[in-house]
Each structure stands twice: as C-alpha cells, then as structure tokens.
Amino acid sequence: LQGKDSSPESVKIELSSECDLFFHFTHVVDEVGFRIMQQQQKLMIDFVEYPKVLIRMLNNCIKEPHSHLAVFVIQRSGHSRLDFIKNMEYKFVELLTCNFVRSSDALVKQHIAYRYNAVKSRLALMQARLSDVNALVKIKNPSLLLQINRDQEKAKLKSK
C-alpha cells in the first residue's frame, strides 16, 4: 500500500513461492486502474476499501478453503490473474479478478537475495544458539559433549 490508509495512491501485491525462487508475479493498481477494474467487474467498492477487501478475501481463502478459492492462472505471455471464487453449493461465483504480470529479472534477483540473506541470518542465529548450548553442556556435563561430538563424527563418515 503506497500512501495513507485513508487515501492510498496504489496497491501492490507480490506473489512468490517457497518451492520456486523464480516464481514471482506482481499486481499494481492505482485509482485510475481500479476504476477500470470496477467497471469491467461491476465492483461495488471504492478504491479506499480495495486493500481491506483483498485482505479479507485472502483470509477467507485460508480460513474457509472449502467455500472460498483463490485460483492463479498463468498465460504464456507472462500475464496472469488471481481469481477469487466463492463456492455457493450449487454454483461458483467469481468475486474479484486481479491481473498480474511476471516480475522483472531485477526484482526477482532482489527477492532471491533477500530470501538468501534471511536464511543466512537464521543460520547464524541457530549456530550461535548451538554454540551456547555446547558451552553449557561443556560446563555441566563434559563427557556428554564428548559423546555428542563422537556421534557427529561417525554420522559424517557414514554420509560420505
């Protein structure tokens, strides 16, 4: 969301995947683009309400997956859309469609670098915790630490 909550300038959604680092799509809409969406889809909300409606729809898809669906369709051209659909027992009703485009290579690289650095910092934190635990075990029970280290060496030899 760019701008204030009460008067946003634009709304941006980025879709990515934990499984595929290069899967990255972006939806950006300003007030003019929203008016076009509003006319095409016969939406009854204003642009100010759009971010809250998107959040509510995404949360509904998470909380009630049997009745609220989010379907992402990718076309060969790189354009794609996210369709929010409600299952009404006897009929599927399309509530909203958001158009996406494949993100630029620069944005994908930036996203990958961010994720890499996040994992790297998490690893450093875990290594620091492990070091603290090793120091504590060394003080409290040195023979246990020696046994753990021997077991780790055996596991390393077996994996090679």
Image: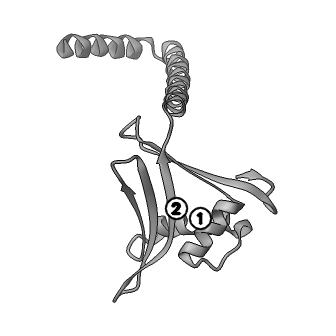
Q: In the figure, is residue 94 to the left or right of 148?
A: right
Please name the residue that numbered disc 1 is placed on.
Answer: 54
Tally the numbered discs: 2
Query: Residue 76 appears at what percent x and percent y?
Result: 33, 48
Residue 149 position within the rendered picture, expressed as x and y whole percent measured from the top left: 35, 12
Kind of residue at badge 1:
Leu
**Where the C terminus falls, by quadrant?**
top left
**Which residue is under mark 2?**
98
Which residue shows up at 52% across the image and 16% down it? 131
Residue count near mark 1 (Cα–Cα under 10 Å), binned few <14, some 14–19, many ≥20: some
Q: Nearer the viewer, residue 126 or 115?
A: 115
Is residue 74 found left or right of 32 in the rendered image?
left
Q: Residue at x 50, y 19 (%)?
A: 127
Viewer-side residue, 72 vs 102: 102
Question: Residue visible at 44% across and 11% down?
Answer: 142
Residue 81 point in image, percent of width and height: 45, 59
Q: What colouring style does the render use?
A: one colour
> Which badge, 1 or 2, is on the more N-terminal residue?
1
The amino acid at mark 2 is Cys
- Front-most of 99 and 113? 99
Query: In the image, which is nearer the foreground, mark 1 or mark 2?
Result: 2
Secondary structure beneath disc 2? strand
- Give the camera-side residue of 106 and 86: 106
Which residue in the rendered view is the most extreme toward the bottom?
A: 90
Q: Which mark is residue 74?
A: none
Residue at 76% x, 58% y: name it: 8
Assign a secondary structure to mark 1: helix
Residue 4, relative to residue 65: is it above or below?
above
Q: Check contact, mark 1 vs mark 2: CB within 8 A.
A: yes
